[in-house]
C-alpha cells in the first residue's frame, strides 16, 4: 500500500523562539497538513499567525465561525499582512491550544492558496476558519509567529505532506 | 520512508451491543492520536452525547462546543468530556444510519495538559435537530494517555458501531 501521509518536518522547541519556519518544502505532495501544539511565554495570550514564502504584503484574508461557550459567531477580515489561522483563539501557557491547518494544492502556480484551520482552546473557544493567500506562487516555506510574543520549550510543530500518487 | 499514520486498533461492536468502547494499553511510541467513531446507541429516537474518559478518568475536563442543529447555532461550555453525539436507534434515518466523530489528540504522551479537537455529525433525514458539533477539549492532567473509553451514558452502543484508533508519528 502506498503511503499517502508523510512527515516532512517536525520540531519540538528546546528554547524560547519567536518564530518557527519550515523551509525548502518539496513540491512533490498534493496538500500540506500543519499540526501545532504550541505554548506561549505570556499569560496574556498570543494571537498566532503564519506567512507563506515570507510574504508580509496585505495578501491574506479569512472567514471564521466560532463557539465561545456562550455564543456562536462568524466574522471575517481582509487585506491583512498576517496569515491568521485563528480569529480569537490565543496560544496559552498551558498547552491548551491546538491547531490543525490543511493547505490544499499548495504547489500549483496558477491559483491563489486556500487553507482550512481548526483551532481549539477549551477554556476560551473552538474555531473553524478558511484563509486565503492571494498569490499564485508555490508555497516553499511557512513561518509561524507567536503574535508579538514567543513560543517556549515543549511547543511542537509538525508539517505533513499528503500524496496523491 | 517512515509510516506516519498507523492503525493501532479497530473495534466493531458485536451482537447485543456494548456499554462502551475502550482502547487500552495504548503504545507510547507515537506523537499524536486520531480516533474515528461511527456510532449509534439504543436511545429511542433522537441522539445523545458521546463521552470520552482518559485513563479511566471523567474528571478535569474543560470543553467549548460550537453546535448547529439545522435551524440554529449555539455555543456552550462544560466540565465533562463530551466529544460529540451518537445517533439513537429508531430515528428517521433508519437502522443503517450512524453518527460520525473524529477526535485529534496531539502530544498524548507529554507531561503537559492534553488538548484535543473533535468534530461530530448526526444526520437522520429530518428537517431539524441534526447536530453538528465542533469541540475544543482540554484534559488538565499531566499523565501520558494510556487508555481511552467512549460511552453514551445511560445507553448501549449498538451492533456495527465502529471505533478506530490511529497513531501518528513525527519521528
Image (tube, grey):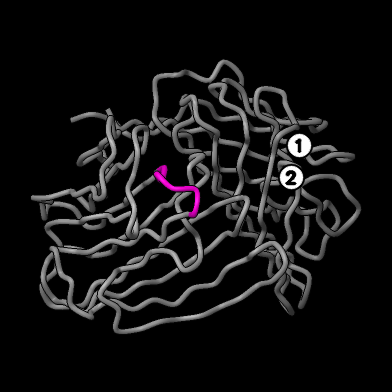
Q: Residues within 10 Å of mark 1 (few under 14, many from 20)?
A: many
The part of the image, by quadrant, that contains residue B121 is: bottom right
Q: Are marks 2 and 1 on the same chain?
A: yes
A105 shown above or below B162: below
Q: What's the chain of the residue with tag 1?
A: B
**Label ID, residue A75:** none
Query: Of all residues shown, which one is farthest toward the top?
Result: B25
Residue B62 in the figure: left or right of residue A96? right
Any part of residue B9 in sight: yes
Magenta-highlighted residues: A39-44
In front of the other: A96 or A139:
A96
**Residue in the image at 69% along x and 65% along y:** B67
Examine the structure image and report whether residue A107 is included in the region drawn in magenta.
no
* Magenta stretch: helix, strand or loop mostly: loop
**Residue in the image at 49% along x and 24% along y:** B111
- Whether pointer 2 and pointer 1 mark residues with C-beta atoms closer than 8 Å, the reply is yes
**Residue in the image at 36% along x and 67% along y:** A84
In front of the other: A64 or B156:
A64
Identify the residue under disc 1: B151
Any part of residue A37 in sight: no
**Label ID, residue B50:** 2
Q: Earlier in the sequence, mark 2 or mark 1?
A: 2
The part of the image, by quadrant, that contains residue B7 is: top left
Amino acid at each position: 500500500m502506498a503511503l499517502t501521509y508523510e512527515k516532512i518536518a517536525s520540531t519540538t522547541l528546546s528554547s524560547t523562539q519567536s518564530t518557527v519556519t519550515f523551509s525548502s518544502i518539496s513540491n512533490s505532495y498534493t496538500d500540506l497538513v500543519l499540526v501545532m501544539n504550541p505554548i506561549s511565554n505570556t499569560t496574556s495570550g498570543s494571537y498566532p499567525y503564519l506567512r507563506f514564502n515570507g510574504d508580509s504584503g496585505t495578501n491574506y484574508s479569512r472567514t471564521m465561525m466560532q463557539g465561545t461557550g456562550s455564543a456562536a459567531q462568524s466574522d471575517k477580515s481582509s487585506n491583512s499582512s498576517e496569515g491568521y489561522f485563528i480569529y480569537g483563539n490565543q496560544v496559552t501557557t498551558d498547552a491548551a491550544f491546538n491547531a490543525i491547518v490543511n493547505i490544499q494544492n499548495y504547489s500549483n502556480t496558477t491559483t491563489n492558496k486556500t487553507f482550512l484551520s481548526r483551532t481549539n482552546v477549551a477554556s476560551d473557544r473552538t474555531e473553524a476558519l478558511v484563509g486565503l493567500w492571494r498569490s499564485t506562487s508555490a508555497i516553499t516555506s511557512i513561518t509561524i509567529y507567536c503574535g508579538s510574543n514567543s513560543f517556549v520549550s515543549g511547543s511542537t510543530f509538525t508539517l505533513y505532506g499528503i500524496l496523491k500518487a | 520512508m517512515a509510516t506516519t499514520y498507523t492503525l493501532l486498533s479497530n473495534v466493531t461492536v458485536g451482537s447485543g451491543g456494548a456499554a462502551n468502547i475502550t482502547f487500552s494499553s495504548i503504545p507510547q511510541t507515537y506523537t499524536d492520536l486520531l480516533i474515528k467513531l461511527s456510532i449509534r446507541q439504543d436511545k429511542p429516537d433522537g441522539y445523545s452525547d458521546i463521552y470520552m474518559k482518559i485513563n479511566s478518568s471523567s474528571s478535569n475536563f474543560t470543553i467549548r462546543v460550537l453546535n448547529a442543529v439545522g435551524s440554529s447555532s449555539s455555543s456552550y461550555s462544560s466540565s465533562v468530556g463530551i466529544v460529540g453525539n451518537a445517533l439513537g436507534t429508531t430515528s428517521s434515518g433508519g437502522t443503517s444510519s450512524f453518527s460520525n466523530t473524529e477526535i485529534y489528540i496531539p502530544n498524548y504522551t507529554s507531561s503537559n495538559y492534553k488538548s484535543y479537537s473533535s468534530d461530530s455529525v448526526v444526520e437522520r433525514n429530518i428537517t431539524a435537530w441534526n447536530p453538528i458539533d465542533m469541540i475544543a477539549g482540554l484534559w488538565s492532567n499531566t499523565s501520558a494517555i494510556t487508555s481511552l473509553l467512549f460511552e453514551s451514558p445511560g445507553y448501549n452502543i449498538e451492533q456495527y458501531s465502529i471505533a478506530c484508533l490511529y497513531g501518528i508519528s513525527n519521528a
